[in-house]
Amino acid sequence: MDQNELRLLENRCIQDEPPECMAACPIHVDARAFAGHMARGAGQDAWKVLKKTMPFPSILGRICDAPCRDRCKRGKAGQAIEIGRLERACVSTPAPKQRIPALPKKEKRIAITGSDLDSLTAAWDLARKGYEISLFDSGDQPGGCLLAMSEKILPRYVVEEEIRELSALGVDIRLNAPVRDEVFHGGMRHDFDAVYLGVDHIAALRDENNGVFVYGYFQNGSSGSPVWKAAEGRRAATSIDRYLQKVSLTAGREREGPYSTRLYTRTDGVIHLSAVQPLDPVLGYTPDEAIREAGRCLQCQCLECVKVCEYLKHFGGYPKRYTREIYNNASIVMGARQANRLINSCSLCGLCEAVCPEDFAMQTLCLEARREMVQKGRMPPSAHEFALLDMAFSNSEQFAMVRHEPGFKTGIFLFFPGCQLSASAPAMVKKVYAHLRRILSGGVGLMLGCCNAPAFWAGDENLFQAEFSSLRDRWNGLGRPQIILACSTCYRIFETHMPEAQIISLWRVLEE
Ligand code: SF4
Ligand code: SF4
Ligand code: SF4
C-alpha cells in the first residue's frame, strides 16, 4: 500500500469527522467537547474549549443565535441540545486565566473600521497574527450595537472588558473617526497595507486585489446573526492575511463557515429527551440545569464497528487509527513488533464491514498486512503457529481421509465435518454421519481434514493454495458431490475459494 492508498483507506473511516454541531457552527466551536465538559460540571474546561475558537467568548457566548441547533443529532431523539444557553451558562462564570499567544510582530499595518463583532473579530485575529492594527470607530465608545443590547443579556462591563483585552493585544482603537468620509477613506488606503470596511453602505468599495476588504452581514446579508458576524470578520482576517502574505485568497478554504460532515451517528434506539427548560429564561441555566442539559448530548460518534467487535474494542481505537499503525508497521518498521498483535488478532469475520456505513473492511486490511509480512519473512512464528500445527495434523495421514459411503462407488453428497468438530466432539460426528446416511439417498461420502483456514488467516497464500488444491483434487476424485459443511468457517472458505462446488450447511440439512 502506498501513501495515497493509505489516505484513501483512512478516509473511508469517518469516525474523525466533526459532529454536526461543530460543522454547522459558522466558527466551528467544538460543541461536542464543550457539552462533554459541561455535563461533568467542568466549567473551566468548557471555557477553554470556547476560548480556542470563539472570538470574545464573554460576548458571543452570551448572544450567539446558535445555528448549530438546526443540525444537532439530539433533535432526532427529542430536542436539539441548547448549546447557546449552555455557552451563556459557561461564560457567566469567571474565565480561566490563560495567556494569549501572539505571533512575532509583522511589518504590515491594517486599518479596520467599525466595532461590531465582525470588525472586532477581524482585529482580534489579525492582531494575534502579529499585524499592527488600527481600529477606527465613528462612536465615542467602541462596541457598536453590542452596547445597545439589554443589560440582562449582555452587560456593558462585559463588552468593555473584552475590548480592554483587544487593546492589551496592541490594537490601537481610535474613536470619533469619520469612517464614511471619502477623504478619510482615501487616507486609510494610502497609509495602511490593507483595509477592512466594517460599516454599512460602503460595500461597493470592496476591492480585494488592492487591499480593500468588506465582509460582514452588510456584504452577505446574514441578517445580523452575531455568530455570523464573527465568522465574517474571521473570513476577512484570513483573506487579509493571505493578501499580505501574497498567497492564494481562495485555496483550501472549503471548510470555512458551515459545511457538511460525513460523521455517522446512530440515533435509532436512543431514548427521546426534551430540552431542559431554565426556571428563569432570562437569566438562563443554573449550574445544575446546565449539567442536566449538557448530559443530553449524544457525544456524537460512529464506532458502529467497535460496538460489535471485541477485537476492535480491545485495542482501544478504531479502524482509521489502526490503518495508520498497520501501514507504519509494514512500511516503516518492516513488521517489527508494534502492530503485530493488532494485525494478527483480527478474526477476519467481516462483521465490521457489515455494520460500517462506509463498508470499511478491517479484515481485508489485516489480511493484506499478514500476507506482506509472510512474503517478507517478517511474520513471527508464534503468531499462528498453534493453528498451523493443528492444520498440519488435520491434513496428515493420522487424521485426513476421504471415501465414498460404504457399499457405494459414487455419491451425491459428501459430509465434511471440519477439523474442529471432529476434534472436540468425534462421537457427535459419527452420529451425524450415520444420521445423514439414513436420511439422504444416493450415497453420502466422508472427507476428514481441515479446510485450511489457518493458512488463510496466517496470510500464507502459498501454503493455503497448495493445501486447498489438494483438497479440491480429492473432491474431484469423488465425482464432485454436493458438500455438507458443519462449520461456518469451512462454509466461508469453500464458498469463497471453491465457487464451482455445490455446498450446503449441515444445519440446513438437519432443518429440512
Ligand atoms: S463503522 Fe467503524 S470503520 Fe466504519 S466509519 Fe464507523 S468507526 Fe469507521
Ligand atoms: S451556539 Fe453558536 S458558537 Fe456555539 S456552537 Fe452553536 S453556533 Fe457555534
Ligand atoms: S448531540 Fe451533542 S455532539 Fe451531537 S450534534 Fe448535538 S450537540 Fe453535537
Image (cartoon, rainbow, N blue to C red):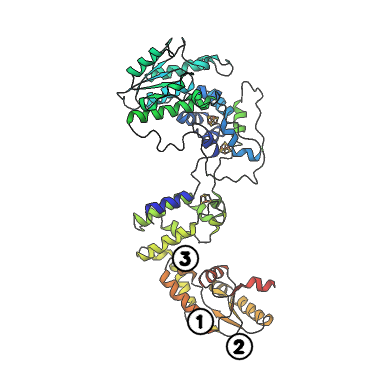
Q: Which mark is residue 457?
A: 3
Residue visible at 60% across and 88% down in the picture: 406
Q: CA distance from mark 2 to mark 1?
A: 17 Å
Name the kind of residue labelled 3 in the image. Trp
- What is the quadrant of the C terminus in the image? bottom right
User: Disc 2 vs disc 1: Cβ atoms closer than 8 Å?
Assistant: no
Quarter of the rendered structure image containing ligand 2:
top right
| Residue with the mark numbered 2 | 406
| Residue with the mark numbered 1 | 474
Q: CA distance from mark 3 to mark 2?
A: 35 Å
Which is closer to the viewer, label 2 or label 1?
A: 1
Name the kind of residue labelled 1 in the image. Arg
Residue 510, given in percent of the width and then of the height, sits at 67, 73
- What is the quadrant of the N terminus in the image? bottom left
SS for callout 1 = helix
* Disc 2 within 8 angstroms of ligand 1 (CB): no
Residue 94 shows in the view: no
Q: Residues within 10 Å of mark 3 (few under 14, many from 20)?
A: many
| Relative horizontal placement of residue 320, taking residue 331 as reference (left or right) | right
Rendered position, 304 above or below 488: above
Residue 283, given in percent of the width and then of the height, sits at 61, 21
SS for callout 2 = loop
Name the kind of residue labelled 2 in the image. Pro
Which is closer to the viewer, label 3 or label 1?
A: 1
Q: Residues within 10 Å of mark 2 (few under 14, many from 20)?
A: few
Residue 508 shows in the view: yes
